[in-house]
Image (tube, grey):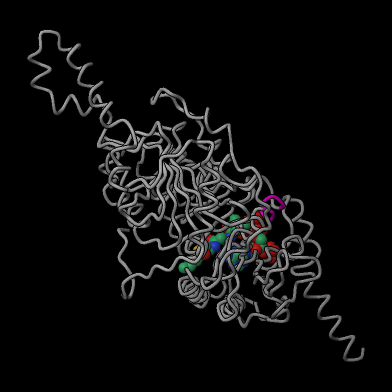
Amino acid sequence: MNKFEILEQKKAEALLGGGEKRIAAQHKKGKLTARERINILLDEGSFEEIGMFVSHRCTDFGMGNEQYLGDGVVTGYGTIHGRLVYVFSQDFTVFGGSLSETHAEKICKIMDMAMENGAPVIGLNDSGGARIQEGVVSLGGYADIFYKNTRASGVIPQLSAIMGPCAGGAVYSPAITDFILMVEQSSYMFVTGPNVVKTVTHEEVTSEELGGAQTHASKSGVTHFACINEVDCINHIKKLLSYMPQNCEEDAPNYPYEMGDETRQKLNTLIPENPNMPYDMKEVIEQICDDNSFLEVHKEYAENIIVGFARVAGRSIGVVANQPASMAGVLDNNSSKKGARFVRFCDAFNIPLLTLVDVPGFLPGTDQEWNGIITNGAKLLYAFCEATVPKITLITRKAYGGAYDVMNSKHIGADLNFAFPNSEIAVMGAKGAVEIIFKKEIDAAENPQQKLDEKVADYAEKFANPYGAAARGFIDEVIIPDQARKKIIKGFTMLQNKVCNMPRKKHGNIPM
Ligand code: HXC
């Protein structure tokens, strides 16, 4: 064999990973290989591999004789829709994708390059965890990755797809990244697996129940997306990236858009007259944003708040909205955490924020208080206060109590605040308010019910409208609903060069 042929042979060996038998086993489980995933993810022919011949250095347990070129992870760079990204894809056919010292070094190398060149990192995770034969060296490798994930946080977008096992401390790299996507039925994430759980707590639970995609999408909120299969997962990654800039110094790409008649008649009838009737805020979002542009994040978790990316006139925005169709749109522990994390991502990456408000307040109760609604509500409040991106708020109906302040009110830095004419902006609903302030008068009345009704009507007339807030400039404009899209497009265009600096500090101390 000449030298070129030797090279070709080595390449062919590397491409086979753990060998044909293990590739067949991977396929039998309904999973793609590390390289197949990269091929679907990146623009055709754009992938350039780095470190194809890297091999592990372990000699214990007969490992010296078991070498696979690449050592269980394929790393490199390429493009998605023509934009540079770095990628690592764990190869389950090599020692179960487990993380060795060299495997970790490969991941760290592309993370360093991504930081230096200002482009997102995508991790396709499919791994049995720490390479058991290597011991502490592998743990060190994980820690090196966690450290780099943290350094990169807020500098470049980091996306983690979980396409197989991800257990033990290995979960903490995805957890630090910006978005997690899991594949239903074939991926799971947990700190300790079902066997340990059974020993310690005597609970009997399957891997799927404990840490499958549905569990983390709806119960824990660990994953932002539960995807029906691997291709769906990869498509979600591509779509998600389309709303983001390459790094914190840039803006997200603008899509071409020709302004037309931006009136949306449907908005005039979407919101029920009766303030206690639910409606689906997603329909409002659809009317306001460009057609089919809304990508919901954390869809199945804390459904009383909606978060997601969208475009208005081709410009990327983040949407945060109360959802009256779920728990009347109340703010609670989970919705506060969900909203806060999303707001912080948008702010870190210069994505303007649109907040749609229909909120009856914070959810009362021991469950909420004992689980820290004070700290968690403060997270959302802090996140909005801290965000310096262009911020527009539209009150579609109710804005009561502390939740009015929290939901990106004028007072905490919104640039433009709109309200529909039916909006109610008050400390609380009319009945609750009257029962407190006129308690004695109502109790003493000949007909307490009649008195209560009179007082409720008075209070509602005074406060159940947006004009008190507009008189003080807390609301910039009361608008007819069908004009909302037009006003929001114009507002974000006006705000596109906004500069707002935070006071000099090392970093803030968000209530964690
Ligand atoms: C080395 C491993 C491995 C590991 C799997 N393999 N996990 N090799 N280190 N951690 C190898 C297997 O020996 C096997 O090799 C091949 O990968 C496929 O594994 P199977 O068990 O045949 O596959 P499957 O039945 O699909 O089960 C997958 C699995 C299981 C559930 C992931 O392999 C497993 O439980 N592995 C151990 C998981 C674990 O305890 N990891 C350490 C967690 S602690 P052959 O040669 O047969 O193909 C941890 C700490 C991180 O990760 C801390 C960071 C701070």
Q: Is residue 76 left or right of residue 118?
A: right
The answer to whether residue 138 is seen in the rendering is yes
Give the quadrant of residue 404.
top left
- Vertical placement of residue 426 versus 99, above or below: above
The answer to whether residue 169 is seen in the rendering is no
Quarter of the image that includes the N terminus = bottom right
Residue 419 part of the magenta segment: no
Which residue is painted at 83% across and 75% down in the image? 12
Q: If the picture is divided into quarters, which one holds ligand 1?
A: bottom right
- Vertical placement of residue 29 versus 16, above or below: above
Q: What main secondary structure does the magenta stretch of the protein show?
A: helix
Which residue is painted at 27% across and 39% down in the image? 401
Give the quadrant of residue 110.
bottom right
Quarter of the image that includes the C terminus = bottom left
Quick one: 415 or 403, which is closer to the camera?
Answer: 415
Which residue is painted at 40% across and 37% down in the image? 358
- The range drawn in magenta is 231-235
Q: Where's residue 333, x and y in %?
A: 35, 44
Quick one: 302 or 97, which is closer to the camera?
Answer: 302
Q: In this view, does 192 lie to the left or right of 398?
A: right
Q: Where's residue 155, x and y in %?
A: 50, 72
Q: In this view, does 287 lie to the left or right of 377?
A: right
Give the quadrant of residue 73.
bottom right
Q: Which residue is outermost to the top?
A: 446
